[in-house]
Amino acid sequence: VITQMVQDLDFPVEVVGMPLVRESDGLAMSSRNVRLSSQERQNALCINQGLLRAQEAATAGESNTQILCDTIKDNIAKAEGIVDYVEAVDAFSLEAVKTISNRPVVIAVAAKFGNVRLLDNIE
């Protein structure tokens, strides 16, 4: 979306995408992480674990994004998290997609553990 906006508005800048930075345990790096109790932090690791499982399933041929997203939602619920959203979207337009085809797809997650809202994603 940002790249398209830069092109559309003819800004003289180069947009360089970077990988998400993770803590050593796999939790997406965020200043909010310090607000997690040790148990909440342990439970929150299910977000990255669920995303990795979804990525593996997609690589193995699962193309139904509802199945992939439901697996992540179930993982979070079992770890006592509250799901805000788990969405599969086109990596360029950010429009929701129902099946994985030939365009890159991002699964984005927002979930709360305790009073801390965490964000994560995987392509």
Image (cartoon, helix red, strand yellow):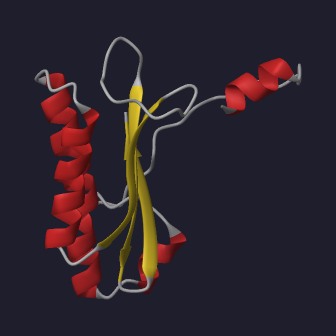
Quick check: 39 left or right of 92?
left
For residue 53, which quarter of the picture? top left
Q: Residue at x 33, y 61 (%)?
A: 27
Q: Residue furthest top?
A: 102
Q: Is residue 3 above or below residue 23?
A: above
Q: Residue 110 location in percent, x, y?
A: 42, 61
The image quadrant that residue 117 belongs to is bottom left
Which residue is at 10% across, 23% downward? 60
The relative height of residue 28 versus residue 117 in the rendered view (above or below) is above
Q: Is residue 7 visible?
A: yes
Q: Position of residue 84 (x, y in %)?
A: 41, 65
Quadrant assignment for the N terminus: top right
Residue drawn where x is 88% and y is 24% of the image? 9
Q: Quadrant of the C terminus?
A: top left
Q: Is residue 107 left or right of residue 38?
A: right
Counting the numbered discs, the total is 0
Residue at x 13%, y 71% (from the top left corner):
78
Pick the front one: 104 or 12: 104
- 83 left or right of 64? right
In the image, is 10 to the left or to the right of 61? right
Residue 25 shows in this picture? no
Q: Horizontal and vertical percent for residue 10? A: 89, 19
Figure check: 88 above or below 82:
above
